[in-house]
Amino acid sequence: MRVSTHDFIRINHHKDRGVVDLLPQKFLLLLLITILMVTDLLFAQTFLINGKIYEIKNGYFDEEQLKDIGFSIVKNEKIYLIYNKKLIIGSSGDLLIDFETYVKDAYLISNSKVLVKSDFITNFLNLSKSDDIYYDKPISVTSLSYSNDVLTISASTQLVKNLINVDVSNGKLTVTIAPAIIEGQKIPPEITVSKKNSTVTLTINKAIERYETRFSGQNAIITLFPSIKKIEYTSKTEKYAGRTFLVNYLIVDPKYVNITPLIPSKGLGTTAPLQSILSQNGYSYGVNANYFDPSTGLPIDVIISNGNVLSHRYGLRPVFIQTTDNKVFIYKAYFDITVRIGDVLLLVKGVNTSSLSEVNLYTSEYKLKIPNDRTKEYLVITNKKVASIGYTSYVPSNSYIVMVGKDIYNQFLTKISKGSEFSIEIYTDNGYKIKNAVGAGPLLIQDGKAIVDANEEKLRYGGGIPTTRTSRTIIAIKDDKVHLITIEGVNGSGMNYDEAVQFLLSKGYDSAMMLDGGGSTSMIYNGKYVTTTSPRNIPVAIGVK
């Protein structure tokens, strides 16, 4: 293709004058490079000869490739190529085969090296063509293996990406190998094999999200990543112990989903329906969470949301925990919450509570008035530093207030001043770093069994929580997945503690505990209630996303 700069002159006529603009030289250079790249791609060819792959560019085999294929080459005034007792004589770009067949413009000499046109080699070796690959004989697939979502294809020759095409369509993985044959090989039951001409097609009927392919010698290794059911929902009408229940299951995989405590947009000390709390936080799935004090609207027991402590423990009650590496547990965890102010480490006794203790921590989510007590000292924390010392009615935005008994303050904190460093630390009994946590109870199941101190556990909860047959919200773990469950009686009451334990054991759960129930029981799936109880205002939800 000949290109002249005159082809790139643009003439614009403006009324009474003519203007000639040359396109910038950079544009010309870029266009020329693009043309060369496209030309190179157009003339790139793949050949499979004698079990070896040859990548041919610009339409010529070079001298090294010819020798590797099996040609002997002699060069003087003419060139001589010998292949399988056939003699090819070359002169002035033309080739004569065995003094019989004359081929014009079949080779050239560049830098004293012989370059032979790929068209000549194709005809001389009588090569076949499959898609963009020319070959003398197809490769043989020698074995197929499939284990743990890894497909390994072994062949009689080195495998490269040109020989294998992998595609995912409608969740089904299809692998096309061409040119190839497969005969008499053991086929794994997960793979369907079809053969047509010189093409072998492998199909795996499994929902696939993506895949990765790598090549190692005569092997192609394809790793499949199955589609993950991150959030599943099912609703069942179930009979148990002669009664009928509506049971909703929201099942999530904690490796991919955060199980996060959420509060109303107006903060702690306020309540709202589950649907509102979830939507305000950008969630479409979830259940109600902690018990709460109806007089203050404050939640009871621990809340840790995305690593932020919002409420402290209430006795040694069970806690659901999701760690920062997405492991999940339900057990009576023991952990301490501490604050470090300067060089002083203090054990926090209360978080976002109206009850007074030696050391209380208030976060900006707390929207009630801070208790004003003359036996306490108050430190306002902003940007991880002490911002001021003295009582403040409400927690400033993005800040903390630490309320400390004056005895402790006078003993340890008199040297603390504005600008002193501040941090919050959580120490757990097993060393896990907590991302999300919710405390409630009673504990129902531990290690796949009813807990041995069930009678004592029931006594830890008043108000008829364990003994009353009522609607239940339960969080449970099974096969490393978290199950959020609501149980409502159909034309009758729900379950008491003992009935819930036996029902969950029959389902094979590893661990389980109750959340707030009764009138608080509610579940949202896809933004809508799936429970029948009229929604009650609550202070905390568990959202999954």
Image (spheres, rainbow, N blue to C red):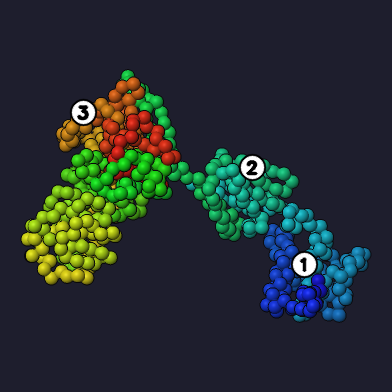
At label 3, the amino acid type is: Thr
Left or right of residue 493: residue 164:
right
**N-terminal-most mark, 2 or 3:** 2
Say if residue 330 shows up in the picture: no
Q: Which residue is at 30% across, 36% downward?
A: 536
Query: Closer to the camera, 212 or 371?
Result: 371
Secondary structure found at label 3: loop
Secondary structure found at label 2: strand
Say if residue 138 shows up in the picture: yes
Left or right of residue 503: residue 113:
right
Query: Closer to the camera, 445 or 351?
Result: 351
Q: Which residue is at 31% across, 51% downward?
A: 305
**N-terminal-most mark, 1 or 3:** 1
Indicate the quadrant where residue 516 lies: top left
Q: Position of residue 321 (x, y in %)?
A: 29, 47
Tag on residue 59? 1
- Contact, mark 1 vs mark 3 (Cβ under 8 Å): no
At label 2, the amino acid type is: Val
Residue where numbered disc 3 is placed: 467
Query: Closer to the camera, 475 or 543?
Result: 543
Secondary structure found at label 1: loop
Residue where numbered disc 2 is placed: 193
Q: Is residue 406 above or below residue 174?
A: below
At label 1, the amino acid type is: Gly
Q: Position of residue 222 (x, y in %)?
A: 56, 52
| Circle 2 crowding by C-alpha within 10 Å: few under 14, some 14–19, many from 20 | some
Q: Is residue 287 above or below residue 247?
A: below
Cα distance in 3D space between marks 2 and 1: 35 Å
Q: Which residue is at 42% across, 43% downward?
A: 284
Judge depth for marks 2 and 1 and give the one in front: 1
Cα distance in 3D space between marks 1 and 3: 85 Å
